[in-house]
Amino acid sequence: TEANANILQRFAKVFDQAYTRFLDLQKAEAQSRESTIEAALEKVRGKALGMHNSNDLTSAASEVFTELKKLGIKPMRCGVGLLNKDSKKAMLYSATGDGDNNNLSLVGWVMLEGHEILTSIYDRWAQNEAYFPVMEGKLLKTYIEKIQSGFILPDLQSDYKHYGYFLPFSV
């Protein structure tokens, strides 16, 4: 009937308004997320610009670690490795968590050899290439054992898949 058609048209208009509102909210959420990311990046930039020597790398790594957690990313470790072409010994300045939402700063040496992941980290760095290994099972377990020989790390979960992000840069 004509009355039913009018009611359906009114419902369609209300649904159109609701859907338009949904799209507006989606856009606002995306903008809010982008603003949150920019604020986190600005905090990290500020920490990096405030560095005076290599010992400040640990606090910069801690800031990156903290900001990633605030963004909903769950890093296990975050840090900077200083490498040179004369040696495969890397000085690491990193941060990790202790499971109680406390950040721990770690500094130590790791030899980038004796394990396929460590060798690839060095080789890719020498070629100025990014490296993104996925580690699990025996590969992950042997990797953790190898890097723990350089310094004490909190218990690293070897029963999960680990994703590495190694990005080269020069000074």
Image (spheres, rainbow, N blue to C red):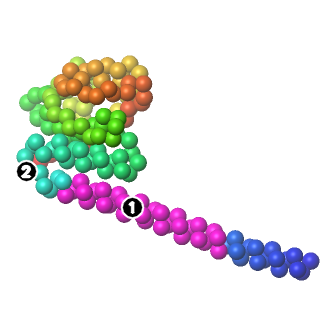
The residue at which mark 1 appears reads as: 34
Left/right of residue 2 with respect to residue 76 in the rendered view: right
Neighbourhood count class around disc 1 (C-alpha, 10 Å): few under 14, some 14–19, many 20 upward:
few
Span of residues in magenta: 17-46
- Tag 1: amino acid: Glu
Residue nearest the viewer, comparing 29 with 121: 29
Mark nearer the N terminus (2 vs 1): 1
Residue in the image at 42% along x and 29% along y:
160
Task: Let me know if residue 107 appears in the view.
Answer: yes
Asked if the stretch drawn in magenta spans residue 38, the answer is: yes
Residue 110 x/y as whole percent: 18, 27
Q: Please name the residue shown 17% across and 42% down the image.
A: 58
- Dot 1: what SS? helix
Q: Main secondary structure of the magenta part?
A: helix
- Residue located beneath label 2 in the image: 52
Q: Is residue 45 above or below residue 54?
A: below
Instruction: Write down the quadrant of residue 122 in the picture.
Output: top left
Few, some or many residues within 10 Å of mark 2 (<14, 14–19, 20+): few
Dots 2 and 1: beta carbons under 8 Å?
Answer: no
Q: Secondary structure at mark 2?
A: loop
Q: Which image quarter holds the N terminus? A: bottom right
How far, Cα to Cα, is label 2 from label 1? 30 Å
Q: Determine if residue 130 is in view.
A: no
Amino acid of disc 2 = His
Residue 12, image x and y in percent? Answer: 74, 73
Instruction: Pick the residue in front: 135 or 148.
Output: 148
Q: Give percent across and percent down for residue 27.
A: 50, 66
Q: Quadrant of residue 37?
A: bottom left
- Pick the residue in front: 84 or 98: 98
Label placed on residue 18: none
The reply to whether the magenta stretch includes residue 11 is no
Residue at point 29%, 40% (across, down): 102
